[in-house]
Image: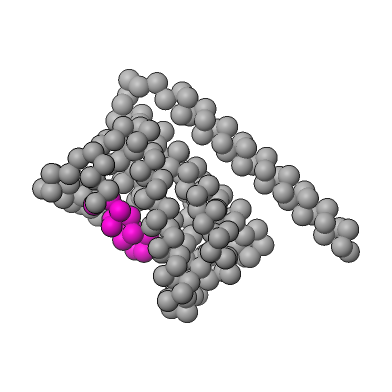
Amino acid sequence: MSDLINDSIDWLLATLGLSGYNVVLVTLPLAIIQGFLGIFPFSTLIFLHISALGVAGGMLMSWLVSIVSSIVVYACCRYWFADWFDRRLQRHAGRYAKWKKYFENYGIWTIIVLRTIPIVPNNVISFLASVSGVKPWPYTISTLVGNLSHIGLFSIISSSILFPDKDIGLLTNSYIAFCVLLLTIFGVSEHRNRSRRRRAM
């Protein structure tokens, strides 16, 4: 199924004759569809962006498209379909209960971690955030940071496939440094929160 979708996307781009930054005319609507349905991996769009725009341009466009998609899905779920999505997620209560609890306990940090480490589909992250009480502004900030990390990871993979002779050491080291920085900020933040809770007791 995934191969069929990838071939269909390639055919659509070729048929419309889109190249360069014009690919966003196709990839943005596809990203929103992916955000709701998750029928193909977002890495497909990252691959397309990098192949059309190069590493830097492809990463930037993938990041911007992913942000728009994530915010659209979150807003629709939160303001229009919250009850419906909550009922849908109840069917998978055992599977996603712990993540919903993490959303309630750690808020934006859960979103950042889940977008950084692709263990939960992006559309499910948006769904869970919308029904877990995460406010719009914290969600937006966590999406900006988390999607940047997510795009970085898959850009490293895509670049190594598309440009095997290109040195991506700087990109890889930047991604590692970014993740270490996130872990440090999280550790300091949690330490402060625990200290406040102890003083409050």
The residue depicted at 73 percent of the width and 44 percent of the height is 188
Q: Nearer the viewer, residue 71 or 172?
A: 71
Find residue 84 and report its horizontal and vertical position in percent: 43, 78
The quadrant in which the C terminus is found is: bottom right
Find out whether residue 31 is within the magenta segment. yes
Query: Would residue 88 be found to the left or right of residue 163 on screen?
Result: right
Find out whether residue 163 is within the magenta segment. no
> How many circles with numbers are drawn on the protein?
0
The relative height of residue 76 versus residue 27 in the rendered view (above or below) is below
Find residue 24 and report its horizontal and vertical position in percent: 27, 48
The relative height of residue 25 versus residue 179 in the rendered view (above or below) is below
The residue depicted at 42 percent of the width and 25 percent of the height is 168
Label the magenta part by its dominant secondary structure.
Answer: helix
Quadrant of res 60: top left
Query: Would residue 32 be found to the left or right of residue 12 on screen?
Result: right
Q: Nearer the viewer, residue 131 or 18?
A: 18
User: What's drawn in magenta, residue-wise?
Assistant: 26-37
Q: Is residue 87 visible?
A: no
Way the structure is coloured: one colour
The residue depicted at 54 percent of the width and 53 percent of the height is 141
The quadrant in which the N terminus is found is: bottom left
Q: Nearer the viewer, residue 39 or 15?
A: 15
Find residue 199 and report its horizontal and vertical position in percent: 88, 58
Find residue 74 and report its horizontal and vertical position in percent: 45, 65
Q: Give the residue furthest to the left.
A: 15
The residue depicted at 46 percent of the width and 23 percent of the height is 169
Q: Is residue 172 visible?
A: yes
